[in-house]
Amino acid sequence: MRIATMGKLLPAMGVLLLTLLCGVAVSPALAADQPKTPQQVADYFADGLIPRLIDLYGSGDGVTKGIDFDATTTVGPISRVLEWTPDFLAGRQTEVPTVLTNNWVASVSVRGAVLGLATVWINPALDAPELAAFDPPELARALAAAPAESLLVHDPARKAWFAIDGDVLTPLVPGTSGATEATTPDAYQHTISDAAIGDNAAGSAPPGVAIAALVLGIVVVGLAVFVLLPVRRRSKAADDDEFDEDVDLPTP
């Protein structure tokens, strides 16, 4: 009896397991799943970043206006940067609205004070990580306000930064995105789509108006040609007559 019952349950459990696996396959990754930092990038943040910052921004060797990096210089947690996918920006429905970029960021502090936000990328030409940018401390502090376990999303076109955690989207640097409070990715997608439609409508005239303007221009040019051409002909004829009157004909 127990064997027969197990025989009936096994197919059902198999269907349930397959359903769960399919759900995992098509569902977007949770924001808590922070992408693992490649070892070469982690090594650069640990050993190569500060020497490079000293070379570019440090004081010493006759430079007095640079940053006084010392033994207290520390690098904060490393975060992979995401961006919106082309489908998301185009307003199309998508299960995964973000894509990983070739950028990692971390704050840099000296004596407990945040100096800036370092962006590191893997240079494709060298296949090695290097410093890409060192932004002001205001950006570092803004990104530090991201909720725990969230991921960073950069919207370069709107100079905006967000923290995404599942269906919660928190603006960290609004830029020109128009997002000022926590929202959802779907709501934000509608916001930027509506803004794009409004900009296109404001920047282009309706087709009927454009056609009417073209026809009017053709009519004006035609009238100008029709009016001015006979005048030029009459003026030329008058000049020819005047020239003929002034010429002395030879006496036979």
Image (cartoon, rainbow, N blue to C red):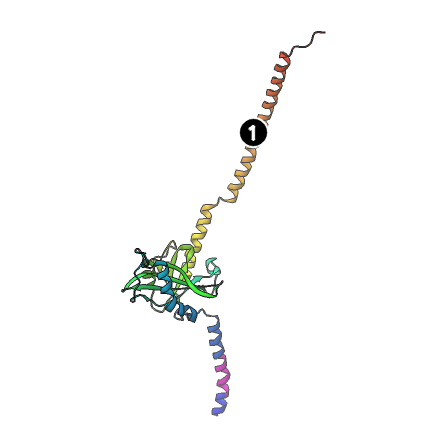
Q: Nearer the viewer, residue 187 or 128?
A: 128
Q: Quadrant of residue 77 in the image?
A: bottom left
Q: Residue at x 46, y 76 (%)?
A: 20
Q: Nearer the viewer, residue 248 or 28?
A: 248
Disc 1 is placed on an element classified as: helix
Q: In the drawing, does residue 88 fall left or right of residue 59?
A: right
Q: Nearer the viewer, residue 251 or 230?
A: 251
Q: Position of residue 226 (x, y in %)?
A: 59, 28
147 over 247 or under it: above or below:
below
Task: Say if the magenta span includes residue 10.
Answer: yes
Q: In the drawing, does residue 111 fall left or right of residue 221?
A: left
Quickly name the residue at label 1: 224
Look at the image and give the residue range highlighted in magenta: 7-16
Q: Residue at x 61, y 20 (%)?
A: 236
Amino acid carrying label 1: it is: Ala
Q: Residue at x 49, y 78 (%)?
A: 18
